[in-house]
Amino acid sequence: MIQLSPAAANEILRLKLKQPQNVLFRLAIKPGGCSGWFYDLSFDETVKVGDRTFDLNGIPLVIDTESLKYINGLTVDYSEDLMGGGFRFQNPQASATCGCGNSFNLTSEG
């Protein structure tokens, strides 16, 4: 399904420390970005109708049903360079990825 690299898991846990205690990590796919779709990472205190919850390396992850279609096999990594740190996404369903790495396109949507 979805994989978190150790670096991504560590960064999410670090960011989560600044949030309320029972907060959930949410991953969503939204229309927009340079290539048509982008990854939206946030913290959320609510599980909405239609959400699926997962446990990734001890991190509670919430994904809406619609987004699940676009991220099967997704690997999330985190790395730092001279421009700062950021999450990196490797999505086997993406037919094209923008230079920013946060936006992608699909050959067959849905």
Image (cartoon, rainbow, N blue to C red):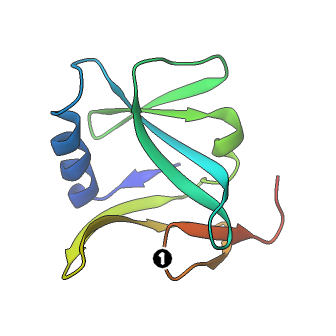
**How far across and down, in percent of the image, does residue 75 sit?**
44, 61
Question: Residue at 59% across / 59% down in the picture?
Answer: 38
Q: In the figure, is residue 100 to the left or right of 72?
A: left
10 Å crowding of disc 1: few (<14), some (14-19), many (20+): few
Q: In screen coordinates, is 96 left or right of 46?
A: right
Q: Amino acid at mark 1?
A: Cys
Question: With respect to residue 90, does 50 lie above or below?
Answer: above
The percent position of residue 71, horizontal first and vertical second, equals 60, 53
- Does 11 sit left or right of 30 as displayed? left
Foreground residue among 3 and 81: 81
In this view, the residue in front, 54 or 49, is: 49
| Rendered position, 11 above or below 105 | above
Query: Residue 99: x percent and y percent?
Result: 51, 83
Q: Is residue 23 above or below residue 71?
A: above
Of residues 22 and 36, the one drawn nearer to the viewer in this rendering: 36
Q: Position of residue 41 (x, y in %)?
A: 44, 46
108 left or right of 38 in image: right
Identify which residue is drawn at 40% across, 19% down. 45
Tell me the quarter of the picture where residue 81 sits: bottom left
- Please name the residue shown 68% across and 34% down the image: 65
Q: Is residue 34 above or below residue 31?
A: below
* Mark 1, residue position: 100
Q: Secondary structure at mark 1?
A: loop
